[in-house]
Image (spheres, rainbow, N blue to C red):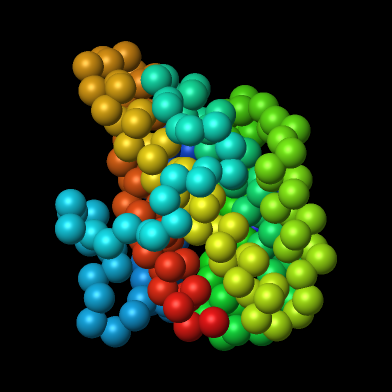
């Protein structure tokens, strides 16, 4: 599906809900198929899933979404950063797994940012940390230095998104409005993907 088809899809509310679901499921399947390390259950969303070792050095403020709007507004910034850096990575990455991840991530970021903007989510200006991250990736020498910079940025991004989704689901547990229910459905579908990408980027960093 190209960008024009995505834009047509999200204008229809029924197709938009199906698109969200399909986007999350397809992205998870593609990432696990192309990047999973043999013998490790990458898509397991349970409490024993391994976490990244980078702690919580988020590329923006600590995540704490109270509403579906908070969740959407929290996702759009990291998604735009991922889009910008992945565009660079598909041309510049040399490690096979880093390049494979960049291709998956670029497709995902195009879909996510298109849908979020169609839902009225404003794109915030990049803050100082995000700008510095982008500049670091732009200036990194092609080879291991670039691959590490790109994958590490993706690790931090997905740690943030993982914890943003977790906080929203916890904070909105008692909400019953249709808007919040749709937001919770989206968060539930994408949370497993965010967790998977934390694990995948951690594993790729070990290979570089």
Quarter occupied by the N terminus: bottom right
Above or below, 44 against 125 in this view is below
| Residue 113 placement: quadrant | top right
Observer-nearest residue: 175 or 208? 208
Q: From where the camera sits, is residue 89 visible?
A: yes
Above or below, 207 against 48 in this view is below
Q: Report the label total.
A: 0
Which residue is outermost to the right? 139
Observer-nearest residue: 162 or 144? 144
Q: From where the camera sits, is residue 107 visible?
A: no
The x and y percentages for residue 123 are 69, 32
| Residue 174 placement: quadrant | top left
What residue appears at the point 32 percent right and 58 percent down from the top-left corner?
A: 51
Above or below, 94 against 85 in this view is below
What residue appears at the point 43 percent right and 68 percent down from the top-left corner?
A: 202
The x and y percentages for residue 75 are 53, 38
Quarter occupied by the C terminus: bottom right
Drawn side of residue 110 relative to residue 174, left or right: right
The x and y percentages for residue 43 are 28, 63
What residue appears at the point 35 percent right and 46 percent down from the top-left corner?
A: 191
Drawn side of residue 26 relative to residue 41, left or right: right
The x and y percentages for residue 140 are 76, 70
Drawn side of residue 51 relative to residue 138, left or right: left
What residue appears at the point 60 percent right and 84 percent down from the top-left corner?
A: 95
């Amino acid at each position: 599906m190209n960008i024009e088809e995505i834009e047509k899809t999200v204008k229809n509310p029924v197709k938009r809900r199906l698109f969200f679901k399909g986007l999350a499921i397809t992205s998870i399947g593609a990432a696990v198929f192309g990047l999973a390390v043999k013998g490790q259950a990458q898509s397991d969303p349970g409490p024993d899933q391994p976490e990244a070792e980078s702690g919580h050095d988020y590329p923006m403020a600590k995540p704490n979404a109270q509403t579906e709007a908070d969740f959407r507004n929290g996702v759009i910034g990291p998604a735009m950063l991922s889009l910008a850096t992945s565009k660079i990575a598909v041309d510049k990455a040399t490690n096979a797994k880093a390049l494979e991840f960049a291709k998956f991530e670029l497709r995902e970021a195009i879909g996510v940012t298109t849908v979020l903007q169609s839902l009225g989510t404003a794109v915030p200006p990049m803050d100082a940390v995000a700008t510095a991250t982008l500049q670091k990736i732009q200036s990194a020498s092609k080879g291991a230095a670039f691959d590490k910079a790109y994958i590490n940025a993706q690790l931090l991004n997905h740690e943030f998104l993982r914890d943003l989704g977790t906080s929203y689901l916890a904070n909105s547990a008692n909400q019953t409005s249709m808007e919040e229910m749709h937001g919770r459905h989206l968060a539930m579908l994408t949370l497993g993907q965010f967790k998977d990408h934390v694990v995948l980027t951690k594993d790729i960093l070990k290979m570089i």
